[in-house]
Image (cartoon, rainbow, N blue to C red):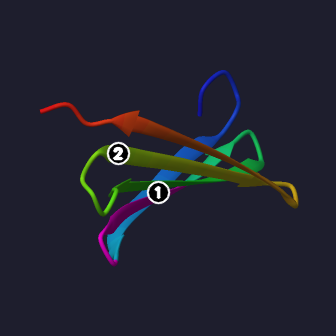
């Protein structure tokens, strides 16, 4: 409890092919939000891809960013 509001989180990770997936369930003051992060490297090894998916209350939003890999 923090200032009367309950909170907790639980997470786990796994591999989906060559992508690492991290899933977290957050509980805050009676509200739940699920966060899924997905990290992968492009086949040509020139980009790192980061995908985040947020789900709560029947709504899901996705955001993807790609970063160049410098060597």
> Mark 1 or mark 2, which is nearer to you?
2
User: Magenta stretch: residue 30 in it?
Assistant: no
- 70 left or right of 27 in image: left
Q: Main secondary structure of the magenta part?
A: strand
* Circle nearer the N terminus (1, 2): 1
Give the number of the disc on residue 48.
Answer: 2
- 29 left or right of 52 in image: right
- Quadrant where the N terminus lies? top right
Q: Label 1's element? A: strand
State the residue at coordinates (60%, 26%).
Answer: 2
Q: Is residue 20 or residue 64 the one in the foreground?
A: 64
Estimate the x, y position of residue 61 in percent, counting from the top left: 76, 49
Q: Residue furthest top?
A: 3
Estimate the x, y position of residue 30 in percent, counting from the top left: 77, 47
Give the number of the disc on residue 10.
Answer: 1
Q: Residue furthest front?
A: 44
């Amino acid at each position: 409890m923090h200032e009367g509001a309950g909170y907790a989180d639980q997470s786990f990770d796994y591999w989906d092919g060559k992508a690492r997936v991290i899933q977290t369930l957050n509980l805050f003051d009676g509200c739940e939000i699920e966060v899924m992060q997905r990290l992968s490297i492009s086949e040509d090894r020139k980009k790192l891809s980061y995908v985040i998916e947020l789900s709560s209350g029947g709504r899901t939003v996705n955001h993807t960013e790609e970063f160049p890999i410098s060597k």
